[in-house]
Every structure is written in C-alpha cells, then in structure tokens.
Amino acid sequence: MTEIVSDATGRKPTTRRRRKTGGITHIVVFLAPAVLIYTVFSIYPLVESLRLSLFAGQPDGSAVWTGLGNYARLLFDANWAVRFWNALWNNLILFFIHMVVQNPLGLLLAALLSLAPRFGGAYRTLIFVPTLLSVVIVGFVWELILSPLWGVAEGMMAAVGLGWLYAPWLGLEGSALTAVSMISVWQYVGIPMMLIYAALLSIPDELLDAARVDGLSGAAIFWKVKLPLILPTLGIVAILTYIGNFTLAFDLIYSIQGVLGPPDYSTDIMGTLMFRTFFGQQTQIGDIYMGATVACMMFFIILIGVGLYLVGVQRRLTRYEM
Amino acid sequence: MKHIMMKTTAAAALCLAAGGAIAQEVTLTIESWRAEDQAIWDEVLIPAFEEQHPDINLEFTPTAPTEYNAALNARLEGGTAGDLITCRPFDGSLPLFQRGQLADITDLEGLSNFPDFAKAAWSTDDGAQVFCVPMASVIHGFIYNADAFTELGLEEPKTVEEFFAVLDAIKEDGTYIPLALGSADQWEAAQTVYTNIGPTYWKGEEGRQALIDGTAEFTDEEFVAPYEQMARWSDYMGDAYQAQGYSDSQNLFTLGRAAIYPAGSWEITGFTDQAFFEMGAFPPPVSAEGDTCYISDHTDIGVGMNASTDHPEAARTFLDWAASAEFAELYTLALPGFFSLSNAEFAVENPLAQEFLSFRQDCESTVRVAAQILSRGEPNLENEMWVVSANVLNETMTPQEAAAEMQQGLESWYEPQQD
Amino acid sequence: MNTVDTTRARRGRMGRIGTAAGVHAVLLTYTLIAIFPVVIVVLNSFKNRRGIFTEPLALPTAETFSTEGYATVLNQGNFLLYYGNSLIVTIVSLFLILLCGAMAAHALSEYRFKLNTLLGVYLILGIMVPIRLGTVAILQLMVDLSLVNTLVSLILVYTAQGLPVAIFILTEFMRTLSRDIKDCARVDGLSEYRIFFEVVLPLIRPVLATVAVFSMIPIWNDLWFPLILASSDATKTVTLGVQQFIGQYTVNWSAVLASLSIAILPVLVLYAIFSRQLISGITAGAVKG
C-alpha cells in the first residue's frame, strides 16, 4: 500500500513498478489476440520478404541462394546504387520539409485552437478534412489545380498579381519534390495538429493558473510551460513523420507522379523504387527478390532512424513526462 | 443490360442442362489493362462468344494500365489471377511464360490464322513456342485538327523541314498550340515520340536488328538524330508542358486547343467520340523528299492462358475464338484503332483508322525499338528510354547525353553490346 | 511567487483583441486552403466539359450547368455497395485495432513479466515496415485460408497493420496513468479483466479516439490491398471504385469529378457527425493532473 501513497503525488516515478501477480493467464489473454493477428498477417509476411531478399530469381521462376548478393548489388552496382542513393536522399528531403513545414504548422494551428477561439470546432473540423481524403482524390485534385492546362493555380495567382510566379512545379526537376511534399503537408497536417491539440488540452489547469498568477504572458506560458510539457508528443510526431515518409508518402507520389518518380527520378523515393522493383510496371517484369532487398533496406533505414530517436531523443524527453 | 444478358445466358444454359446435355457451366475471368474497353466487352464481345458457347461465361475484369502489371504479378504469384490474361508484347510477357505462369498454346489451331511476325511478339526467341494469341497492333503517327489546317491553309507535312514549317505557321498564327504533348507522364516521350519519329532515321527493322546484334549503338547518328529533332519540339509544346500529363494532352487536342497530336492509333475511338472537328493523320515525316518512310506498327496486345487455370479446356475454347476471323472483325470494328493481326480480310470503317492503315502500304513497318530482347535486363531499357526522352523534351539533357545514358545502361548487361 | 506585474497585465488585456483577430486570421486562412480543393471539385462536378475547362473557378451557370457526370457515375458505378464495403472494413478493423491494441498495451504497461520489453519491441516493430512489403506472402496466406475476395481478408490485414501504432501510442499513454485507481479497484476485489474494461478503458477514451482517427485514414484510403486481395465487384471499396472509374473515364472530367464528389461527400458528413464525439471525447476525457 505504500506505493499508492508515493504515487499519489501525481508525478510518475522514474522507475516503473509493475504489479507482480500470481497467475499469468490474464496477461496471455490480453496479449494473445494482438500478438496472433500481428504475427500471422504482418510479421510472417515480412520475414518471408527478408528470406526472399537472400535469393536471386532465375528465368524459369526458381530461385537460388545468393546470400547478401542482392544487397551488394543494390549498394555497389553502379546502375542500382545511383537509384538507391537518389531515392534515399529524396526521402530525407521529404522528411526535412515535413519537419520544418508540416509539424510547426500543426503546432501553430493546435496552439491557436487550444486558446479556444470562437468557431474553434469548425476550424478544427475543416482543417482535418484533407486528411480524410483518399490519395486518389488528393492526387487528382492537386494535379488539376496545378495543371497548366486547367489554369486554376495560375489564374488565382494572376488575380493577385503573382501570375509571373507560376511554374509547372510538378513537372520541373527542381521543384517537383517540394511540390509533392507541400501537397502531402496539406493533406496530413491534421494529424500533428490533432495530436498536439490533445496534448495541450491535457495540461493540468492548475499548472497554467499558477503560471498566470506568476504573471507570465500568453506567449511566455506557451514557450516556457506548455511546450516543454508537450515535448513527448512532439517526439512522437517526429517519429511518426519519419516513418510516414517511408510508408504514407509512397501512395501520394504514386498517385500524382507515378512509379518512376518523374521528372528524371527527382521524386523517386524508397517506396516507389521498391514498388517498381518488386512488382514491375508497364514494360518491366517485377523481381520479387530484388524488390524484397529494397524493402529490407528500407526497413533497416527506418530501424536506424527510430533507434537513434529512442536512444538519443526520447531518453532525454522522459524527464518532462507528467 | 449486362446483368439481364447474363441471366438470359444462364437460363439458356440451365435449359440445356435440363434437356439432358451435361453442360458443366464455367466462368472464365479475363485480366486486362484496357479499362476503357469494359463496355465493348460487356456489350459486344462477351455476348457474341457466349451465344456460341452457352456453357462458358466470360467476365472482363480490367485493372488500370498503371497498376496492371503489378497487380497481375501479385495475383499470379498468389495463384488468384484470372483464367485468361491479356499479354503485353515481347519482354513484357516472355518472363511470365518462362516462369510457367502463362501456358504453352503452340498447338492451338487458331494460331494458323496469324502471320509469323504477329506471333513473334508472343513466342520464345527461337519461335518454337507460342504463349499468347495476337490480338492487335497499334500504329504510330500524327493526328491533326483538319479544320485548323484548312483554316490556316496548311498541308500534311512530308519531310521534317515541312513539319517544322507547319509548326512555325501554327505558332505564328497563335490560335492553336502547335503540339498537344506533355512530358509529365514520360511514356509518351518514348512511345509516341521517340519510337514514332525514330524508325525513319534508323531504317526500321534494320536499325532495330543492328542494336540486337550489337552492330549498332544508341550513340550512333541514326539513334541520336530523333532526339535532335525532339530537342527542337519544346518550342512548339504548350506552356508549362513539363507538368502536362497524358490526359491533359488528350483534352487539349479534343477540345480544339492544339493542332497536332503525336499519336498511337489507340486514340482513334476516344477522339472520334470527343472531338467536334474533322481529323486527319500523317505518318512520321522523312528527312528528305522521296525517302522511304518507316512506321511503328507495334504488336501491342495479345491474350493468353493462365497456366494454373482450373478450366484449361474452356480457356482454350475462348483462345480459339479470339484467333477467329469473327473475333478479329468484331474487335476491330468496336475498337477501330486496334488493328487485328489476323490474316482475315475485312473492311475498316472509321476514316481515321483507314488513314492509319494506309501508312502500311506506303511505309515500312517495325516495332518499338526497345521492346524485344533489349528490355530484359536491369536497368530496364524501356524505362530508361521513358526518362531520357522526357528529359530531352524538358531540355534538361542533350540528345547526346540521352543516347549515351541508354547505351551505358544497355551495355551494362547485354553481351552483344559489350565489346 | 512573484507579485503581479500590473503593466504587463494591462498590456495583455489590450493585446487580447488584436490577438483574437490574429488567431482568426491564421485559422481562417488555413481553413480556406484546406477546403478549397474540395470546393473546386464539387463545384465543377456540376458543369459540362466545356464549362469545366473554360471557367474552372466560376459557379455553374445556366449554360454550363450539367449533371451528366452524376448520371454517368450512377449508371456505371456501384458506389452504394462500395461505400458499404469501405464502411464495414473500416469500422470492424478499427474495433479490432482498438480492442486488441488496448488489451496488449494494458498488459505491457501494467504487468511485470518475462519478455515484457521484448514483446513490446516486437509489437512496435511493425510501425517501421510498410506491410505492403509482405504482399505476396499475404496473398498466398489468404489463398490458403480461402479468404481472397472477402472483406475479412482486408480486415485482418488492416488490423495487423494498425496494431503497432495503436500499441505504441496506447502504451506510452497508459504508462502515465495513475496507478491509484487500479490498485484501489484491486483492493475492492475486481478481477484483472474488469479492471481493464471498467477502470482503464474509460480512462484512456480520449487517446482511443485519437488512435481511431489515426488508424482510420490509411484503412479508408488504401488502394493496394483492395486491388490485390478483394478486387471483385462485390468487395470493392470506394477508393478502388473511384480509382478504376477514373481510369475508365480519363477524359470525361464531368464524370470523374462527379465520382470524386460522391466519394468525398459522405466522408465529410460522417466526419462532421463523429468529429463532435471525437472532440468531446478528447476534451471531456482529457486527464487533468
């Protein structure tokens, strides 16, 4: 019973005390459904992919063991390496743009919403709308809007005297990736916004009251009280953004630009490279073994990123945990 | 409509069964990338087939062209692909046969209705085994807005210089965008531009075979020259053509805003429906007056049988029908831009399709240069061609660089080119 | 505690009106950006082809007004059925993700047992890999289970795909839950199951809502697995239906825009209804202190 008393302060003890119980039946019951579904329909197929990456396909459809041969090819064969590094680099740019545009924007919107302005509910609802739309729709709509043929973007920019700024962004090597990233930001900013908003709401009123009594201005409260408190959430947002770059981003690029990442591979990311290697495309027959290799490289890269986060960032963040 | 018909067929089949004939009814599904053809299959082809074969039901289940190969591959690996499979030509289907996913149909009687060049697109390299029934080829050329030509007093260009003179005249006038072409989707740059205007320079089959034998290289003059012509095209394409996709170009042309459309004959059906003006067609212009013209008459679409179908007999029955003169005529009439490869003789009614067909009399035919043998390796030559061709149109690569990149990719795995 | 600085307080009051205006300006601008594309689509879906091209930003006029696009869609597509499919798949998957995910997260955050950390890492691993990478094996699995072209196949895959994120977020959150209530409940003699369902679940309601929204989006929008696992007409989802419709009518923009509108509108209606509950869930349940 002493532990209840020690916990009643409201602060989390840094070392977690878990209840040690006699039976383990309930633990098994709690874990079994998730572990079962997840293992059969997610892990097993992925392990299968991992296995495939160690084989090389033969013309007759059979496969021979090649060990790490596929990985060597991907990293050191000139024709593969150029595509691989290009895709990885584009992924990192994509991540960077999301970190400097999407997440600050989400934070800003969430912070403004948390001030409980009038019509806050309406704003929140509407800003989240793009997130609900299928990439099929998002891709089509933005292609239309940015299309030089239809001229919506050009017309609107011309109306405010910025017509000369217009360029066929999606079609230019220098701007295509940024344009796609901005569309992605438009679609997904609702997610960080909602997560951060929920985190801001869960900050205890007493803390904020105390800060106000201390004479802190609204801005100071935000920077000095709220922001540190929601850092764990920002950490989660960052890591989800990182992972999203390798998962969600594919769908959007695929539906806007297609599987070759045009122009000249400037929007080619790991996802599109994996997809066309794995499944092929119009004139190319898929190679599931090489595709699985790209897939596994992608897995390792995500793993490294998440690992760095867990070791480097989250450990430092935990001290702010409520 | 479709459902009613299916019910009638089913009812007919039931009657037959009741009448004592032991008709085992089977349903065959057809995989295809021709989503646009759904109505033609449902309303014309399937009823015609089912009338003769009441015990076999057909279902046409297309996938969008961009997803077709990926989805088909996954379904073949998983064993859920349809009984009948629409085949891409040459290296697009050969691996499926080699992996045992497409059945050997060499002994199919109907195949005798086709010339050898048609069967070559769906045969092993030695020609010993055939795995798909040839359905149709598509012819490349240029479709133009004939009303616009009349209005501006222009004539069909014969030579490259005349072609540019026409483009200049249209540009000068300013009413129309000279070329309805964009580079955003990339494939048009390769398929309806490079392999459309190219054969004239590399002398069709001669140049293509030379590449396969390793006696010619992409960096040779005749393969760079088409890129040099393309580099001049960007002045005549619409503003911001870099972001203009395939359907944008189609819309530009059919809405009467552009004058000339570098085309494949598959556009004929759609254009005939959509355009409100007269259209004409001309073959790719030649270098000098009197030169032989060459066209890409590309064996584009065939149909084969899933090796693991549960109903091989029924599937073969369908393939025999698909090889018949009846199918050839129905198919070509319904889709005037897809020219049957069958020896059967019949008239094509669509005037635009007739014009395309007339190219065959005046010009030498070839197929797309990268389709056979050369697109087997990694990097995939056809993919490379899409990318560098678009780059040339975008002016981000010189003709020489584009050719060199293709050559470098090809050399990296294709032995005849490696000396 | 400092004394209240009166000047600063006054400045605060003065600035408040300006601040409010600024807040609204920012939110309103972004809201317009967010919904503008949707408006454009719906607007143009009521025009004919020429109207769409010549005046994309104009309201439909007598001359350009047309519902031909909707006529085509309603004649050709089976969108009601597709909707039903999407709804069933999304709702059942969500239910399974939330239930199984919360149970697993509870076990991981509440009990000390061997393999706890290992299992935790194992369950979260899936966040890092797009499940699409295992498509071929999944398809073979579904074939063996005779689940191809059933909605069940999609539900299983989406549940497997959604669990890691759900468990990740829920575990993080559950670790911050105060233990007092649970331990009190134990003292009262509640079984571990009742503690989970009656004490823990109500406490994590707001996070469940967040996880629900999170998990819902990739499921509703997915194109790939419907294409591979359930592309038959009876099991098609809206996303796949619209995508194929676009493929079939590339140049018939009235029809394409109409199909997009038809796909968008019900989602918005549903969201408008549920967003209130979602938000009231977040606010009411927000753990204070």
Image: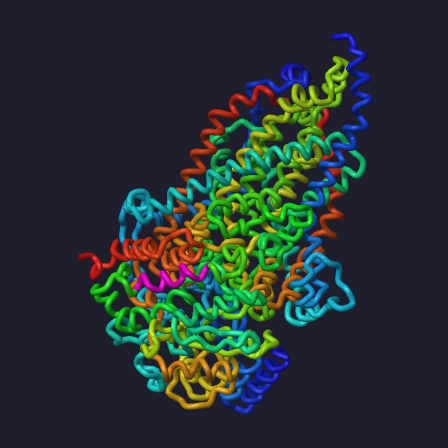
In the displayed structure, A63 sits above or below B93; it is above
Comparing B367 with B100, the one in front is B367
What residue is drawn where x is 63% and y is 35%? A105
Where residue C208 sits, quadrant-wise, is: top right
Q: Is A29 above or below relative to B338?
A: above
Range of the magenta residues?
A: B223-234
On the picture, is A105 further left or further right than A273?
Answer: right
Is residue B229 in the magenta section?
yes
**B334 horizontally vs A294: left or right:** right
Residue at 56%, 22% in the rendered image? A318
Residue at the image position 81 percent from the left and 28 percent from the top: C17
Instruction: Locate the C terminus of chain A and report the quarter of the image it occupies.
Output: top right
Residue C95 position within the rendered picture, expressed as x and y whole percent measured from the top left: 64, 47
Report the predominant secondary structure element of the magenta stretch: helix
- Front-lying residue, A26 or B45: B45
Q: Position of residue A302 (x, y in %)?
A: 45, 38
- Indicate whether residue A283 is drawn in magenta: no
Q: Residue at x 63, y 65 (%)?
A: C253
Looking at the picture, tell me which residue is in the foreground, C237 or B356: B356
